[in-house]
Amino acid sequence: MSLIKKIKDKKVNFEFNKEYLKVVTNKITNNDAQFITNSFNEMHPADAADIIEHLSQNDRENLIKLNNFNIDPEVFVELNESVQSEIIAYLSSDSIVKLLTNLESDDAIAILENVDEKDKNDILSSLPPKDRFALLESLSYPEDTAARIMQRDFTAIPSNWSVGQTIDYLRENKDLPEEFLEIFIVDEDFKPIGTVPSSKVLTASRDIKMLTIMSESQLLIPVDMDKEEVGNVFENYNLNSAAVVDKTNKLVGMITYDDVLTVLKEEAEEDALRLAGVGDEEITDGVLTKTKRRFNWLLLNLFTAFLATWVISLFGATIEQMVVLAFLMPIVASMGGNAGMQTLAVTVRTLATNDLTKNNFTQNILKEFNIGILNGIIFAIISALIVHLWFGDNLLSLIISVSMIITMMVAGLFGIVVPLTLKKMDIDPAIASSVFVTTITDVIGFVSFLGVSAYFL
């Protein structure tokens, strides 16, 4: 049973209905485009997109190619990027043009990014000149910049207008965004000098000048600012929207909180996947695609595993003296690896949010080092007790406790040093850090445990 709520006359399903998916699949087989179109029209676009994503690739292709079925632009933008790319391959250039002309500029840009270069020019040439120019200008900026997520439809008025003139303009202008929270006030050079909340316009007298109710404090987003940094700005200052300006500080667009929410979600997912060595992966990706994305890091992990094995081989004589060492050494390396990954995850997150700065760098290094010592002592005591109860050997308990402290200290230290070093080398720490940290902690774990063993034995 699904919990259903109405949002703007659209049904919202809070629980995915598997039975309905079977109905849709049958209707696709029977070429019943009318039923599917009517059903999707009654749903919230996000739920219709959810249905499409859960179809098999073959059913999705058959759905898009059904006569009299046209995918709604609002549904299309709710699809994940992998499915969007798949569906675009099934659409004609005319269908893609229709999608673009019915979407906001930021969503249109996201679609164009998934179109093959050979088809992109044909599609752009079919667009109205105004739309074509706007999209081409946005495409001229790097992919991860503010220009790619901004909307080119915004509300801006001259600084000398009154509230009455502004209200009349808002009522008569047909090219305004469907929704906007703030009105930008611009000077004669079209440079933003302030903002006025739309609610304040509705409550002020018609003869009052907009300048008198304008808020001069505003954050301007450069077109080339990294979109992750844009997300941090919105988060730090609790913004609903912000003006985007070009190199001459002229107003060229706006970014709203819903666009930023998507960016923050994507960045968080991306960091989590990269820390695991997976990369940008969607649940709808095929077996071969996923295999290719995971192969490189698995191959690198294989070589690092051989490195750790080579380190163990250097202490073959020590292991022969006390075979039980072979049973216990994975414990030390595993604890070090987990401790290092904990520190690494926290560090990558603080780097992404700009919480780690030059001012608190030394303090955080010392903090992680102290955490490593404290955890090392705690788990050294626990491990020593378990080993003593298991083997009844005081020397073995001493060996594992000393090596545990050393490994945990090194793990905490390198968990923060490695991502910081990669960051300074302009390498994404979320991508490469995990391999280096796990390799270092494995090697140090084996060296400390077997080295201490060799010393006492």
Image (tube, grey):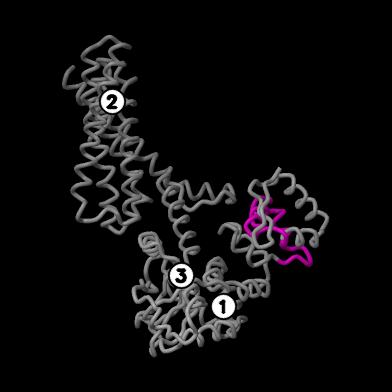
Residue 411 numbered mark, or none: none
**Quarter of the figure with the C terminus:** top left
Pick whichever of labels 3 and 1 is earlier in the sequence: 1
Q: Residue furthest top?
A: 392
Q: Is residue 139 visible?
A: no
Residue at image coords 64%, 59%: 7
The kind of residue on which mark 3 rests is Ile
Above or below, 15 relative to 256:
above
Q: Quadrant of the N terminus?
A: top right
- Confirm or deny contact between disc 3 and disc 2 (CB under 8 A): no
The earlier-in-sequence mark between 1 and 2 is 1
The residue under label 2 is: 379
Distance from Cα at disc 3 to Cα at disc 2: 49 Å
Q: Of the residues tagged 3 and 2, which is closer to the observer?
A: 3
Q: Residue at x 25, y 21 (%)?
A: 381
The x and y percentages for residue 430 are 37, 50
- Between 212 and 347, which is closer to the camera in this rendering? 212
Q: Is residue 313 above or below residue 257?
A: above
Tell me if mark 3 has few (under 14), some (14-19) or many (20+) residues whose alpha carbon lies within 10 angstroms of its own: many
C-alpha gap between disc 1 and disc 2: 62 Å
Report whether residue 405 is seen: yes
**Magenta span includes 225:** no
Magenta residues span 41-70
Q: Which quadrant of the view contains residue 344?
A: top left
Report, in whole angstroms, how far the alpha carbon at label 3 lies from the one at label 1: 26 Å
Where is mark 3, residue-wise?
A: 255
Dots 1, 2 in contact, CB < 8 A? no
Amino acid type of the residue tagged 1 in the rendering: Asn
